[in-house]
Amino acid sequence: MTAQTHVPSLTVRLGTVCALALAVTGGTTLAPGGTSEANAAAVAARALHVAASKKGAPYQYGASGPSRFDCSGLTLYSFKQAGRRLPRSAQQQYNSSRHVTAGSRKAGDLVFFHSGGSVYHVGIYAGNGRIWHSPKTGAVVRLERIWSSAVWYGRVG
């Protein structure tokens, strides 16, 4: 086959990839060299999928997977599997994330529970007011409704 016979096929494939990228980002296009919202959305979706795949894994203080987790261990593990590094503690993860409002939160964002200025728990936002998290000793990784209004949101870039 000649190169000419491959060009239309490649164009069709690239068009499909571009259409998928636009679907993921809600049609947002970016300038070349800018921060890729599409890439960030794909990472967040992958991290959310990883966290959900750990449903039922037992809580263990200080554990970061692959079969036992504490809260920040689950988020660290999930984002690591998606290609992003996070610091170890919930507070450090909050400090290193891009803070977003509740109104602009998206599935895959981190949800930080706080008391005053200190973060004490973290999970991954699943949409519809729910998070995947590893709550406490004796519990397992699970999907749960956000139970407090004392939360902040962070996006992993």
Image (spheres, rainbow, N blue to C red):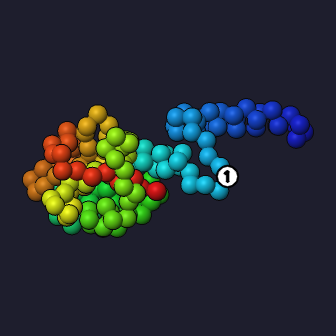
Residue at x 54% of width, y 45% of height: 38
Q: Is residue 81 above or below residue 108?
A: below
Residue 107 horizontal side relative to residue 148, left or right: right
* Residue at horizontal 10 percent and vertical 57 percent from the top: 137
Residue 10 vertical placement versus 35 (above, below): above
Compared with 93, 145 (above or below) is above
Count residues near mark 1 (Cα–Cα under 10 Å), then give few for <14, some for 14-19, many for 20+: few
Q: Secondary structure at mark 1?
A: loop
**Within the image, what quadrant is residue 102 found in?**
top left
What residue sits 39% from the left and 53% below the top?
155
Side (left or right) of 9 relative to 122: right
Q: Is residue 89 above or below residue 24?
A: below
- Residue identified by numbered label 1: 32
Nearer-the-camera pick, 118 or 51: 118
**At label 1, which amino acid type do we have?**
Pro
For residue 132, say whether it is visible: yes
The N terminus, quarter of image: top right
Q: Position of residue 101 (x, y in %)?
A: 34, 47
Whether residue 53 appears in this view of the structure is: no
